[in-house]
């Protein structure tokens, strides 16, 4: 069982006066994801940088961590990410 770490940027947009997830983008490094999320939040309502660890063979999630949040992010985003 081999684990793979992926860094992702989740954008947020406003639709009908509510924040909703927008596009997702993969970044090569943790610092790259943080920099990209911060830059995107300057153009969009908000963005978050995530670290996702999953089994490379089965795709089963091991963990998801929020590295940083910039701009407007839904209040329950952390709960959604942790599966709560």
Image (spheres, helix red, strand yellow):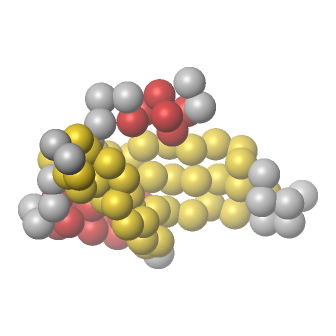
Placement of the C terminus among the 4 image quadrants:
top right
Residue lying at 39% horizontally and 47% vertically, measured from the top left: 67
Q: Position of residue 22 (x, y in %)?
A: 34, 60
Q: Position of residue 56 (x, y in %)?
A: 79, 65
* Horizontal relation, residue 4 to residue 12: left or right: right
Place residue 73 in its image quadrant. Answer: top left
Across the whole image, how many numbered discs are drawn on residues?
A: 0
Q: Position of residue 24 (x, y in %)?
A: 42, 66
Q: Is residue 3 above or below residue 36?
A: above
Front residue (pair 76, 50): 76
* Horizontal relation, residue 11 to residue 30: left or right: left
Place residue 66 in its image quadrant. Answer: top left
Pick out the residue farthest to the left: 42
Residue lying at 51% horizontally and 53% vertically, measured from the top left: 51
Placement of the N terminus among the 4 image quadrants:
bottom right
Residue 20 in view here: yes
Pick out the residue farthest to the bottom: 28
Residue 48 in view here: no
Pick out the residue farthest to the top: 84
Residue lying at 45% horizontally and 52% vertically, measured from the top left: 50
């Amino acid at each position: 069982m081999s684990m793979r770490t992926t860094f992702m940027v989740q954008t947020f947009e406003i639709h009908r006066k509510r924040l909703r997830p927008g596009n997702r983008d993969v970044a090569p490094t943790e610092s790259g994801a943080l920099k990209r999320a911060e830059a995107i939040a300057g153009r969009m309502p908000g963005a978050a940088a995530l670290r996702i660890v999953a089994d490379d063979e089965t795709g089963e999630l091991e963990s998801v961590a929020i590295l940083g949040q910039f701009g407007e992010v839904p209040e329950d985003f952390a709960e959604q990410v942790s599966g709560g």
